Image (cartoon, rainbow, N blue to C red):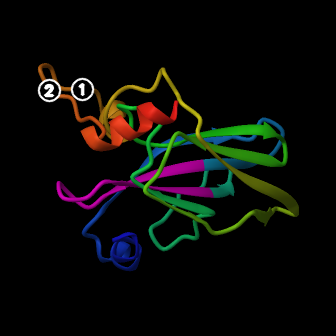
Amino acid sequence: MVLLVLMFRDFGEWSFDEVARVGDPQANVDAILVETNGGATTSFGYEVFLLARGHAAERSGHPVATFYGAVRSEHAYGVNLRWVSSDTLAVEYLDAQHVNWLNGSLILDGRKINIVLKPGVTDPSAPPGGMLYNLQGRPRGAVEQIVEPERRERLSHQA
């Protein structure tokens, strides 16, 4: 399933929305998180890009990591980006159905930047549902989109 998403992501069928941007405080580099969504029968996908400050991620770009069905808590989809030092980006998440770590490091503007994946990290402050949905604001009276009940049960036993 993940391979299908990755193979057809450029056909314009999936959404491709920037949902987080975290600048390296000591360099001219942004870590960018894009959320993809193929519709009601698929989970959310997430792509992490490292780009020069101010540049936008593109569908044809080269992410350093991709996630399918990643969650930050029992109710919240997504991953968190955090600079742990000026040369290391941590990508934190509780669990994911599929992870592709495409580059453990990247040279950008002459600097080597390491990318570290950190599964098993719960974000209790993450709001329920997809990240874009929460950025756009919840419609009044909307039904919450939550992590599938079977997966939520499995995650609660891991804690």
| In the image: residue 149, left or right of residue 31 | left
Residue farthest along the left direction in this orientation:
141
* Residue 119 percent coordinates (x, y): 60, 45
Q: Residue furthest bottom?
A: 7
How many neighbours does mark 2 have within 10 angstroms: few (below 14), some (14-19), or many (20 or more)?
A: few
Sort mark 1 into few (<14), some (14-19) or many (20+) by Cα contacts within 10 Å.
few
The residue under the point 31% across, 35% down is: 129
Taking 117 as reference, is 157 left or right?
left
Residue 50 locus on image (x, y percent): 66, 56
* x 47%, y 51%: residue: 96
Judge depth for marks 1 and 2 and give the one in front.
2
| Residue under pointer 1 | 138
Give the number of marks: 2
Picture disc at residue 128? none
Q: Amino acid at mark 2?
A: Ala
Is residue 26 shown left or right of residue 15?
A: right
Q: Quadrant of residue 39?
A: bottom left
Residue indicated by mark 2? 142
The secondary structure type at the circle numbered 1 is: loop
Residue 148 seen by the camera = no
| Residue 35, magenta (yes or no) | yes
Bounds of the magenta segment: 32-49
The front one of 23 and 100 is: 100
Q: Is residue 131 magenta?
A: no
